[in-house]
Image (tube, helix red, strand yellow):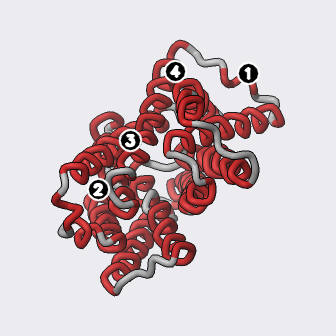
Amino acid sequence: MTAASMDRSAPTVSVTQGKALGGVLPFVLGSALLGSIGIFVHMAEAGALTATWFRCAFGLLGLTAWLLWRRQLHVLRLAPSTAGWVLLASALMVLGWVLFFAAMERISAGVAVVLFHMQPMWVLVLGALCLGERPGRHRVAAVALAMLGLVLATGVLQQAASQQGAQPQYWWGVGMCLLGALLTAAVTVIARRLRAMPAGVLAWWQCAVGSAVLWLAPATQGWPAWGAAWGWLAALGLVHTAAAYALIYIGMARLPTGRIAVLQFVYPAIAIVVDWQYFGHRLGALQMVGVVVMGLAIGYAERRASGKTSPS
């Protein structure tokens, strides 16, 4: 390579590296916020569907206020070429949330989390099929290793071998999680198609669809008692939906699906730590090994990604 060609390629590499870094930070921060969602759901003491509706409703309020402050309400108007994709992604995300909460009524939270986070592998498959992105052997290996760590960290193998694993309801819950993971992965791929859309618009439409569809839940099951529960539910929508998803979609627009697939393990990793520290569910030796394996897989993938975007 000549000096002239190196000079021409250096700015491109620098821009690519800066764009990737600018995507990792918001994506990881948004995922970390989601990792603490269990505390808010627990403290709100509301039913699954009711909590989901409040999440959508308060998330909608938060995102609307944010767009108002940025004077960007006009971006909510969808072009004919994107309207179908946005509404499809919104419906898939809401259905994924419903399936996840429904699964938690049939299987333990730990098993639900690990099965729902089969989505990184789905992201790699759908990214290759729909977007023509080739993640490479190292990325696939990193995702597979992180998934192994996730399985160990949540203790899903021990729970599946228990009496609960022999009940039909358990396998209904498993099926719901796997389907929900596929739907959520499809949303990730659609978000990549819509990366030119301003951050927060897709999340706004998801909350709007969820608010319109799920309002019957609190109306028929009863509204939470006025007081602290409403504060927890408000935070569930404002923090874990409005803020978290806006950050995640900012990151998605700047990252390839292969890198997103690996970084998605930040959410369950944080959730496991929160479950341990807040709810007192102490991890066994095998579960601690799983957390370490997840961390190593994410670190390995990120080092390779940084090495590929840095000048030689």
Q: Is residue 97 visible?
A: yes
Residue at 64% x, 38% y is 223
Along the viewing direction, whichever of 289 and 280 lies nearer the viewer: 280
Q: Amino acid at mark 2?
A: Gly
Rendering coords of residue 145 (x, y %)? 29, 68
Report the mark closest to the observer, 3 or 4. Answer: 3
User: Which SS class for mark 2?
Assistant: loop
Residue that mark 2 sits on: 136
Report the mark closest to the observer, 2 or 3. Answer: 3
Q: Bin the neighbour count of mark 2 within 10 Å (Cα to Cα): few under 14, some 14-19, many 20 and up.
A: few
State if disc 2 and disc 1 touch (CB < 8 Å): no
Q: Amino acid at mark 4?
A: Thr
In the displayed structure image, the side of residue 175 where residue 16 appears, left or right: right
State if disc 3 and disc 1 touch (CB < 8 Å): no
Residue that mark 1 sits on: 74
Badge 1 or badge 4: first in the primary sequence: 1
Q: Is residue 89 above or below residue 185?
A: above
Q: Is residue 91 above or below residue 162?
A: above
Along the viewing direction, whichever of 270 and 220 lies nearer the viewer: 220
Q: Amino acid at mark 1?
A: His
Q: CA distance from mark 2 to mark 3?
A: 31 Å
Residue that mark 3 sits on: 99
Rendering coords of residue 233 (x, y %)? 66, 48
Badge 3 or badge 4: first in the primary sequence: 4
